[in-house]
Image (cartoon, coloured by chain):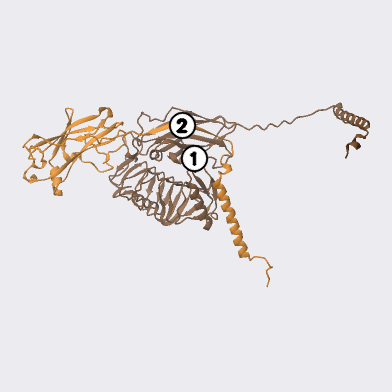
Chain colours: A orange, B brown
Amino acid sequence: MIERRSGQRPKKERLRLAEQWAGGIFLLGLTASLWVQPAGTYSWMWKGVKDTGNQFAIGLLDITSSVFGEKWRVIEGGNQAVDLFRMIPGDARQLEATLSSGESDLEFIYKIVAEVKEAGKPEDVQKLEEVLRIRIESGGSVIYDGLVRGLHQEQPGLKHVNGTEEHFSPHQRSKTFAITVYLPKEGVDHSFQALKGNLEIRFLAKQATLDAIFAE
Amino acid sequence: MKWEQVKNWPWKRIAMGTAVLTSIVASTSFGTYAYFTSQVEDSSTFAAGKLEISLGETKARFQAADDQPFLPGVRFEKTLTVHNQSDVPVKYALLAEKEGGDDIVYDRLVVEVRRENEGGELLYHGRVSQLTLANVIIPELPKDESDDLHFSVYLPESTGNEVQQKSADVTFGFLATQQDNGHYFAQGGPVMTFTPQDLNGTKLVETLRMASKEAEKDSVTGLTFILEEGSYDLSDMKLPEKVTWKAAPGKEGKVVVRADELQVSNAAFEGIRFEGSGTGLYVGSNVSFSGCTFDGRFDAAIRTMPDLSGEKTLEGLTVKDSTFAGAEAAILLDQTIKGAFIANNSFSGVQHAVVVANDRETEVQIVGNDFANVNKYAVDSGGVQVGDGIEGFKETSEENGDAKKLALHLFKADLYLEDNKYD
């Protein structure tokens, strides 16, 4: 048996100490690196040039100051000025709407979408949309005249044009539309009686670039 | 010694002797030149060479081709010319820094830098904010030559109304140095190299602790950790912020990081290979992966970090030039995140590549990826799926357009896809 000389540490302990020592050195080096910038970073010849003052500023597109008239006006038919539910074939009601560019400083493209929303029975919506028509006029010309469902918002991903799309410059400030909703005199039989629905009409706007999409 | 003794010295003899000695020394000295002489001179002048670059530009400011305003998807362009007026060839780094304005714009800005030659070699396509790391080095610009670099800056098409009426002022620049300078000559902060042994046990804990402490200082722009080849187990750890983790040059893909539920925010990874299972990395805001590999039985290789308050919106995830294999979902965005940029990645054998599964508006730009070997959907968001053979949601090109595009405004996400490969 070989006896260990007095004062000599076992190999395992020596290794542990060596490891601790190396760890200490490592952390010392790490501290030094973090404390001061490494000398090598800029120690060679170098030269920098800069192109300054490149501003990328984004404008504003905001049509939230657009307004829809508060009351529908009776154009044809009975005297129900407010209650759209009581329309009969041949009746027409009109609403004035104003698209406003508000504080916008960007040109944009707008479109008008419309949809009958549920106001009681879900099945009423689809049936009402089979006959309910809408005519949109502005500046003396008719922009759209057809079924309300032709102005539905479409599924995302599909490029859809409903004919109401138009370019709008903020210099124009505002544009007024006469929106007439009517039931045709023909093709609306007794099965359409007492159908209820809420008509939702919206302006959508998008930035005037080729690939932009409406939020639909 | 006393003055009386000195006074009695023989001063006359001393003076005479000194005069004789002086004349001997002087005559010896003159004698050196009495013979024929000749000499050659080696005059070594150590004059430092000149390292000088200068900048030229095509126009005073960035602008769109048809002078459109700066909107999401509109490219603002400018060509910058770097002249090498040095005595030697140089290499240089592309740099950008925020001069002023709003972070919400600056953090979202993307720049494409190409050489303005016939091939239009792509040098960089990614966030402007990542160019502060000087990670794009042009290895040679010969003496007396120039590089024309075309910069195209844009906000991704998926960017929403939150940037309206905001702006960012950006400085683009070039930092040139001698070609024999090291790889990291333009780094803004300390650069440290680690081996697997260095990042292990107590040393790992201590290193991360010190780096976290360092990152808290406002003056610190960033640390760079260079990892040598080998395996590093960082599972269940929360990594310090403002650190770029880079594979050592030539070791890209050979630096393996074991990542099971690794939490990262404000950090960048370049050339790292991530392996693990379950959720790989939980990402907070401003995390960037470039040239990385994700390989393993991940349920989600990259997943947005849960926000217990439910109010925080994450932003600025960049995943580019990376490869994903074998995950259930490669990138799972189940928290609201703005400004996610997923470009030029390859997905192979994953069930779904990008899954948007949060209930608020998320903005994701998905460009130039290869989804051909995705098992199910390239993109899945609340029932809207994009991929091969799915009707309705396909990238299409305009009549005169050359790139296929698809923009989706969904309840849960604004997605913009362009030039991806599905089959």
Q: Is residue B48 left or right of residue A77?
A: right
Q: Which mark is residue B136?
A: 1
Same-chain status of marks 2 and 1: no
Q: Which mark is residue B105?
A: none
At numbered mark 1, what does the secondary structure look like: helix, strand or loop?
loop
Dots 2, 1 in contact, CB < 8 A? no
Quadrant where the C terminus of chain A sits is: top left
Q: Estimate the x, y position of residue A104 in percent, counting from the top left.
A: 29, 32
Nearer to us in this view, B222 or A192: B222
- Binning the other alpha carbons within 10 Å of mark 2 as few (below 14), some (14 to 19) or many (20 upward) gives some
Nearer to us in this view, B72 or B105: B105
Nearer to us in this view, B139 or B266: B266
Task: Provide the chain ID for the residue under circle 2.
Answer: A
Q: Is residue A191 left or right of residue B298?
A: left
Q: Is residue B195 left or right of residue B310?
A: right
Q: Estimate the x, y position of residue B19 in percent, counting from the top left.
A: 90, 29
Task: Provide the chain ID for the residue under circle 1.
Answer: B
Query: Callout 2, which amino acid?
Result: Thr
Residue A201, quarter of picture: top left
Residue A184, quarter of picture: top left
Between label 2 and label 1, give the one nearer the viewer: 2
Q: Which mark is residue A52?
A: 2
Q: Is residue A26 visible?
A: yes
Which residue sits at x=55%, y=50%?
A30
At numbered mark 2, what does the secondary structure look like: helix, strand or loop?
strand
Q: Is residue A169 visible?
A: no
